[in-house]
Image: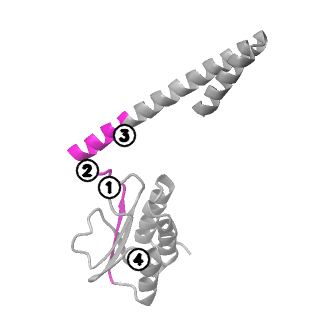
Amino acid sequence: MERPRGTKSKADQIKAFLSQYQPKLSEARGFLQFMLSKEEILRRTEIVSDLTGADCAILVSAKGSGTWPFLFRLGDKVYTKTSQAVVELMKAVPERIALCLSTAPPEWSEERQEFLETLARWHDEVFQEDLERVTRRQELLRRIDEALDAGDRETFAQLAAELRRLG
């Protein structure tokens, strides 16, 4: 059976979200698929960018967005688990369901900038340490080969011990 134009458009928007983004909460993918399978729920769903004022509100966030992973609000009750949301929707379908599919990146702030700069600095330090360790390892292996070729057991034992300590 063909869906009415309004529900088809909503279904297409949800499907597009699922094909383009990975939800932060993996169970949210199944929840959206549940919504797609229920014509009555889909018919009463309105896809919005802001959940303010909605008595029944659902938020599904994509990885990389700055919003909560999943939220289902029904009146004064708030649920963060998809299983709870399914149970509530199976009990009774509200007249209007506001669905926000959030892909917006987190707001930029001085703290976020400082955090990213610290991460970049740590990455550079770790990378430099790894590079130095690999270079030192290669040098030790080359010198071990030379000691073996020369039959120098004492130098070989000393270099082999240093290589073991290097890890």
Residue that appears at 42% across and 64% down: 9
Kindly identify the amino acid type of the residue bearing the numbered disc 1.
Gly
Of labels 2 and 4, earlier in sequence is 4
Image location (x, y in percent) of residue 53: 21, 74
Kindly identify the amino acid type of the residue bearing the numbered disc 4.
Arg
Which region of the structure is painted magenta?
95-121
Q: Secondary structure at mark 1?
A: loop
CB contact under 8 Å: marks 3 and 2: no
Instruction: Pick the residue in front: 14 or 12.
Output: 14
Question: Which is closer to the viewer, label 1 or label 3?
Answer: 3
Instruction: Pick the residue in front: 71 or 33.
Output: 71
Residue hosting label 1: 66
Question: Which is closer to the viewer, label 4 or label 1?
Answer: 1
Real-space CA distance between mark 2 and mark 4, rounded to the nearest whole angstrom: 33 Å
Q: Secondary structure at mark 3?
A: helix
CB contact under 8 Å: marks 2 and 1: yes
Of labels 1 and 3, earlier in sequence is 1
Real-space CA distance between mark 3 and mark 2, rounded to the nearest whole angstrom: 18 Å
Kindly identify the amino acid type of the residue bearing the numbered disc 2.
Glu
Instruction: Pick the residue in front: 161 or 126.
Output: 161
Real-space CA distance between mark 4 and mark 1, rounded to the nearest whole angstrom: 28 Å
Of labels 4 and 1, earlier in sequence is 4
Residue hosting label 2: 107
Q: On screen, 163 above or below 37?
A: above
Residue hosting label 4: 43
Q: Secondary structure at mark 2?
A: loop
| Quadrant where the C terminus is found in the figure | top right
Real-space CA distance between mark 2 and mark 1, rounded to the nearest whole angstrom: 7 Å
Of labels 3 and 2, earlier in sequence is 2
Real-space CA distance between mark 1 and mark 3, rounded to the nearest whole angstrom: 19 Å
